[in-house]
Image: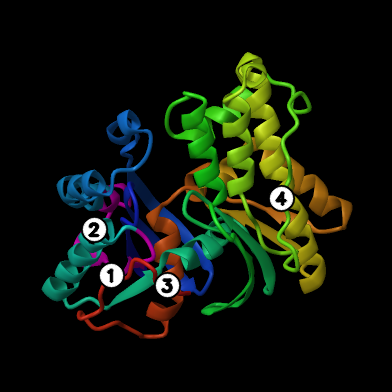
Amino acid sequence: MLILGIESSCDDAAAAVIETATAGIAEVRSSTVANQDDIHRAYGGIVPELASRNHVITITAVIERALAGAGCALGDIEGIAVTRGPGLVGSLLVGLMCAKGLAQGTGLPMVGVNHIEGHLLAPLLEHRIAMPYLALVVSGGHTALFAVEDFGRYRRLGRTRDDAAGEAFDKVAKLMGLGYPGGRVIDEMSRKGNRKRVRIPRAQVKGAPLDFSFSGVKTAVATLLATADGRAELPEDLAASFQEAVVDMLVKPTVAAARELGADTIALTGGVAANSRLRVRLAEAAAAEGRRLVAPALKYCTDNAAMIALAGSYRLLRGERDELTIDAEANLAL
């Protein structure tokens, strides 16, 4: 089955074509993304109105590029999978309405996909993983631990109580005047810094060892930068120390959740899964307990339509379809 995936939940407009005959096993024929970093950089973060307006301009071209890259035409597609939430509702509506138009015009079956489900299954684009497995979804909008028990069956084990990890990276980068996107620049700067130089407190949620909290570490950096001593610190050392604190707070609950679940495999996914230090530390922690860490290639960590196509494929293969009346939901539950 050839499936067209469409993703527009935030600031990236993406389309992909995958070929699959079995749930969870697919060949990515093409994956195209239109990135908006240059548009939002001047504001230090994503401006929702600008994101959705730019999607209107780019979405058709992105789909056409995905079809051309896959060496096929729209008439060869056998199903459409599109993100319907969670995310920025204006951005979601652009991709969803486009998918509805294609389904209406062609008669193709269409399914709406939860963006988080896409991230949970993204590692399957490149790896064979036996279920159940533990997934850490960590991005600018989400930080949570899930037991992936089967296709369509997920159990949340832990979540952030305030900021997502990626949000903390972006806010600290803004406080330090490093620009946007913050996670990427802090990761690069940290390679030159001493991660033990600046004392950054680690937060734990009392009574909920599998939950996360990142507002305190962000506040700690803001408080430090308000002092003369803090401003005198080398930015590389401060970036490295902050990143190490965030990584510590991600690794400890993840390993504890894997132990509790009895999972042999830990999947790391989401935009912050591209962080080089997190990949190294979590791989080491998993190996120390005889577990395997699986992380997608960087292009499948950030928002992409290949993971959306894969997340919709198991339903399309069963002959399911959603009505064209489905709506975008900014806070869609998994």
**Image point (37%, 51%), residue name:** 30
Q: Quadrant of residue 197?
A: top right
Provide residue 184's location: percent of width, then percent of height: 52, 33
Foreground of the two, 27 or 244? 244
- Whole-Å distance between the Cαs marked 4 and 2? 34 Å
Q: In which quarter of the image is residue 83?
A: bottom left
Q: Earlier in the sequence, mark 1 or mark 4?
A: 4
- Whole-Å distance between the Cαs marked 3 and 2? 25 Å
Q: Is residue 9 left or right of residue 218?
A: left
Sort mark 1 into few (<14), some (14-19) or many (20+) by Cα contacts within 10 Å: many
With respect to residue 117, does 49 lie above or below?
Answer: above
Q: Which label number is shown at residue 328?
A: 1
Q: Which of marks 3 and 2 is nearer the N terminus?
A: 2
**Image point (80%, 53%), residue name:** 286
Sort mark 2 into few (<14), some (14-19) or many (20+) by Cα contacts within 10 Å: many
Label 1 element class: loop
Tell me the quarter of the image containing the N terminus. bottom left
Disc 3 + disc 4, Cβ < 8 Å: no
**Image point (28%, 62%), residue name:** 89
- Residue type pointed to by label 2: Gly
- Whole-Å distance between the Cαs marked 3 and 1? 19 Å
| Residue of label 2 | 90
Foreground of the two, 169 or 319? 169
- Residue type pointed to by label 4: Ala
Provide residue 249's location: percent of width, then percent of height: 71, 49
| Residue of label 3 | 313
Q: Earlier in the sequence, mark 3 or mark 4?
A: 4
| Residue of label 4 | 203
